[in-house]
Amino acid sequence: MNTDRLASLVVVFAFSVGLGVGTIAIPLLALGAGYDAATVGFLVATSAASQLAFRLCLPWLFGRFADRTLIAGASLLMVAAFASLLVSTVIAVFVVSQLLQGAARAIFWTSSQTHAVRGVGRPVERLVDVNVAGNAGTLIGPVIAGTLAAFGLPFAIGAAAIGASVAVAGSGLLRRLPPYDRRRSAGATRLLRRDGVDVACWASVVGGGWWAMLGSYIPVILVGAGVGAGGIGWLVTLSEAASIAGILVLRRLPGGRIRGVVQIGSYTAALVLAGLAVLPDALAGFAALLIIGGVASGAITTLAPAMASLAATPEEQGDVLALSGTFRAAALLAAPAAVGALLAVVALPAGMVLLGAGLGLPGLVLGRSRQPGRANR
């Protein structure tokens, strides 16, 4: 393994550990500071909105800065997000922290993907390695948060800041690649009309919808079925582990089969969301569906960006990865809001079924009227 690839994996892992710690520690810190659950939800939405806004700016950033510079800058933003909470827990600081975290996540993940696909080796294998490192970090992070929280939440927040700091330091070891020449890109609108890119963006919406539900309404369904907090934690961890296993299996997938796996994974994730809503209260059934959904979401997370990049020229890869990431970020924000709005007129199971249908149906018509893109050649 060359130095660039090893440094990239260390950076992604360290950043993800910080993110995983913060996912647990920040809500607990907010509750401990006296804020209610609605305020915590508002803070999560603030981070999602910031992530979406900065993803829209990424093509401009890719045309002006090297991707390793963006990775370092995003890691610094994450350090600042955590460090600010060590100074104060007033609501304004929480809001600023979440805005910084959303910006950091948007810039970091897409920059890491662009760095991966521009490196030596097959794009699929590089993206698999990046995603496995990221998933490993987010799996370990909550355990670290829970352990350190016993000594005090500031210790957990400090650990998150250290993880992001390691990512800052490691980014200096990444190979410097020039900014993209955006004058040679077709632009977002034309790229979206390109066969392969459109399907990848739809898959990114499904993947974003899955992760949004995993962190919001799926636990609510499990609670309603009588599953305790410990059981929910293990089920979510099982789903995440299945995602990593699925990604590793797909590491050497031939390029010509990517489209089919992306489509199957997207339909599967949408069906699992509907199935969880109507499944009889059976722990084994929930576990089976979450494992299947985890494998499907892992395939989407890895292969949708790979599919998009294969349909683009080298100078378009930054734009196309930013485009697919924007659709994912939009789904992370919109999917919980859509289900929340549906709850005004229907019960949660019906709302989840409608969401699953809404996520899956667009895939039936995308790409059918155009010639195959580069991803299938």
Image (cartoon, rainbow, N blue to C red):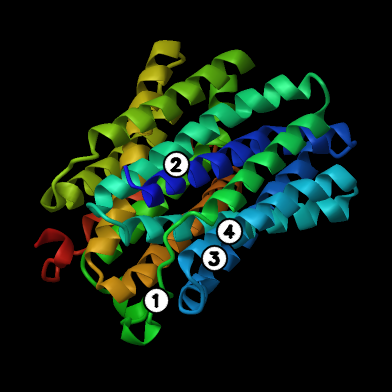
Nearest to viewer (mark 2 / mark 3): 3
Q: Tell me where residue 32 appears, x and y as whole percent.
A: 86, 32
* Contact? badges 4 and 1 (CB < 8 Å): no
Say which element carries label 4: helix
Amino acid type indicated by mark 2 = Trp
Binning the other alpha carbons within 10 Å of mark 1 as few (below 14), some (14 to 19) or many (20 upward) gives many
Residue lying at 54% horizontally and 64% vertically, measured from the top left: 70
What is the number of the mark on residue 180?
1
Task: Confirm or deny contact between disc 1 and disc 2 (CB under 8 A).
Answer: no
Residue drawn at the location 63% of the way across and 17% of the way down: 229
Label 3 is placed on what type of residue? Thr
Q: Which residue is mark 2?
A: 210
Query: For the residues marked 4 and 1, what is the alpha-carbon distance in whole angstroms?
Result: 17 Å
At x 60% / y 50%, what residue is drawn? 169
Label 2 neighbour load within 10 Å: few <14, some 14-19, many 20+: many
**Which mark lies nearer to you, 3 or 1?**
3
Dot 2 falls on a residue whose secondary structure is helix
Q: Amino acid at mark 1?
A: Tyr
What's the residue type where badge 4 is placed? Answer: Ala
Closer to us: 22 or 261: 22
Residue tagged 3: 69
How far across and down, in percent of the image, does residue 239 sit?
A: 43, 26
| Mark 3 or mark 1, earlier in chain | 3
Query: Does label 4 or label 2 sit earlier along the sequence?
Result: 4
Question: Within the image, what quadrant is residue 128 found in?
Answer: top left
Rendering coords of residue 18 (x, y %): 63, 40
Q: Which residue is mark 4?
A: 72
> Which tag, 4 or 1, sits closer to the chain's start?
4
